[in-house]
């Protein structure tokens, strides 16, 4: 008995759609495969710290249009993003957390969540949950300190128009970067798709 490739007919598609047992079994098998993948190759832990960044737009540009304020905000956000990934900030993080280098930090361990005016979320990934928490905390605090030193200085008018404060850097909790439910869903959908294609396009021949 061997498998042969053949194009499905409309009857084949109708029969497949009606085969509820096939869909149920395939979904369960796929979810089981997803769960096995989660426990055999678990995703890294991810911790999040938060820094509040307020540009005080109304005070900085009271007479300008919304469009001008938008471009101003976009420019200033890019500057702060550069500070967040600067050598000074990352070197500070590496000096506070044992066993990590600046090169490793630049290779995907650290991520920011759509920074703008308001809460900036600093994410850190690591296989060790404690180290993920330490990385996120150190990165957020180093960023806030560096912004204070470089941008907000007593002799600058910017002091009145921007404020930065590390609001969540202590007692952080790390969680898996991808939840088990995602693995179950992807496994079930993926196995269903592969099984359905196999049933439709491949038939056994004696």
Image (cartoon, rainbow, N blue to C red):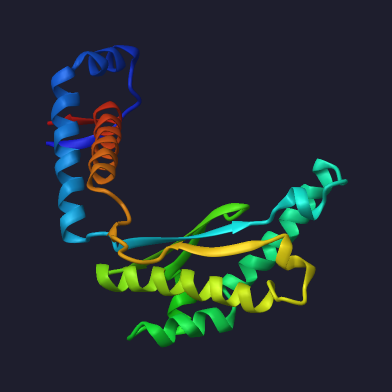
Q: Quadrant of the C terminus?
A: top left
- Asked whether residue 204 is in view, the answer is yes
- Asked whether residue 128 is in view, the answer is no
- 100 versus 63 height, above or below: below
- 70 versus 130 height, above or below: above
Q: Quadrant of the N terminus?
A: top left
Say which residue appears at 36% left-offset and 82% top-offset: 97
Q: Position of residue 43 (x, y in %)?
A: 28, 59
Q: Position of residue 114 (x, y in %)?
A: 56, 53
Q: Position of residue 113 (x, y in %)?
A: 51, 55
Q: How many marks?
A: 0
Say which residue appears at 77% left-offset and 52% top-offset: 59
Say which residue appears at 26% left-offset and 67% top-offset: 129
Q: Nearer the viewer, residue 82 or 23?
A: 82
Say which residue appears at 80% left-offset and 42% top-offset: 66
- Quarter of the image for residue 185 reads top left
- Quarter of the image for residue 60 reads bottom right
Q: Is residue 39 left or right of residue 87?
A: left
Q: Position of residue 92 (x, y in %)?
A: 48, 84
Q: Nearer the viewer, residue 163 or 29?
A: 163
- 28 versus 168 height, above or below: above
Residue at the extreme right: 63
């Amino acid at each position: 008995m061997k498998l042969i490739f053949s194009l499905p007919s409309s009857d084949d598609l109708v029969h497949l759609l009606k085969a509820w047992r096939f869909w149920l079994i395939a979904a369960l098998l796929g979810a089981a495969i997803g769960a096995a993948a989660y426990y055999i190759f678990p995703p890294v832990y991810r911790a999040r710290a938060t820094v509040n960044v307020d540009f005080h737009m109304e005070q900085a540009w009271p007479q300008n249009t919304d469009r001008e304020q938008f471009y101003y905000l976009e420019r200033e956000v890019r500057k702060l993003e550069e500070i967040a990934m600067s050598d000074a900030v990352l070197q500070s993080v590496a000096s506070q957390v044992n066993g990590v280098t600046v090169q490793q930090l630049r290779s995907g361990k650290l991520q920011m969540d759509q920074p703008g005016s308001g809460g900036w979320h600093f994410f850190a990934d690591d296989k060790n949950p404690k180290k993920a928490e330490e990385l996120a905390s150190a990165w957020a605090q180093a960023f806030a300190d560096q912004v204070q030193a470089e941008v907000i200085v007593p002799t600058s008018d910017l002091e009145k128009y921007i404020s930065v404060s590390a609001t969540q850097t202590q007692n952080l909790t790390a969680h898996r970067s991808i939840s088990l439910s995602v693995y179950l869903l992807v496994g079930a959908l993926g196995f269903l798709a592969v099984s359905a294609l196999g049933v439709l396009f491949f038939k056994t021949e004696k």
